Image (spheres, rainbow, N blue to C red):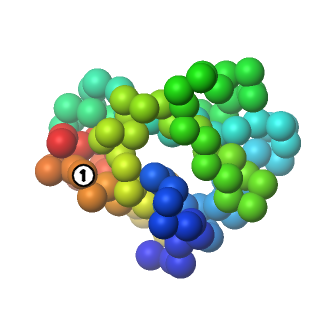
Amino acid sequence: MTQTTAAPQKGILISETALAQLQAMQAQQGTDLLLRVGVRQGGCSGMSYTMDFITPEGIHEKDEVYDYDGFRVVCDPKSLLYIYGMTLDYSTALIGGGFKFTNPNAAQTCGCGSSFSA
């Protein structure tokens, strides 16, 4: 895993590699976008991770917003209960590459790494 960019008070940690990839994606889609990270019911282990770019108008009153040198990540309070302390990393490997979630709250994760149970 690459070095993580985050202060201890942030509920979601992002590696430098993942941050660079997210910033590149943001630049392609629009620089005023924020990344919404969360969980939803589903997936092979019971809950799946979600990631989407949103506009600033998509921020809800109770959402947590974390700033990573100008790149902002938003998470709703319910999702944060399940992913607090999670590290988001990115791999460029040909097999198994892409975004990787390392969640200390997950009791079990599936083989694909995109779903978990708590």
In this picture, residue 57 sits left or right of residue 102? right
Residue at position x 54%, y 38% in the image: 64
Corner quadrant of residue 77 = top left
In this picture, residue 25 sits left or right of residue 112? right
Q: How many marks?
A: 1
| Residue indicated by mark 1 | 105
Residue 40 point in image, percent of width and height:
35, 27
Residue at position x 73%, y 52% in the image: 71
Residue at position x 68%, y 29% in the image: 54
The quadrant the N terminus occupies is bottom left
**SS for dot 1:** loop
Residue 36 point in image, percent of width and height:
58, 36
Residue 60 point in image, percent of width and height:
60, 22
Is residue 20 at least partly visible in the picture?
yes
Residue at position x 38%, y 34% in the image: 79
Toward the left, the furthest residue is 107
Q: Is residue 70 above or below residue 41?
A: below
Residue 73 point in image, percent of width and height:
61, 45
Front residue of 45 and 105: 105
Front residue of 94 and 55: 55
Is residue 88 at least partly visible in the picture?
no
Corner quadrant of residue 23 = bottom right
In this picture, residue 23 sits left or right of residue 19? right
**Circle 1 Cα neighbour tier, 10 Å, few/some/many (<14 / 14–19 / ≥20):** some
Q: Is residue 43 above or below residue 22?
A: above
Q: Amino acid at mark 1?
A: Asn
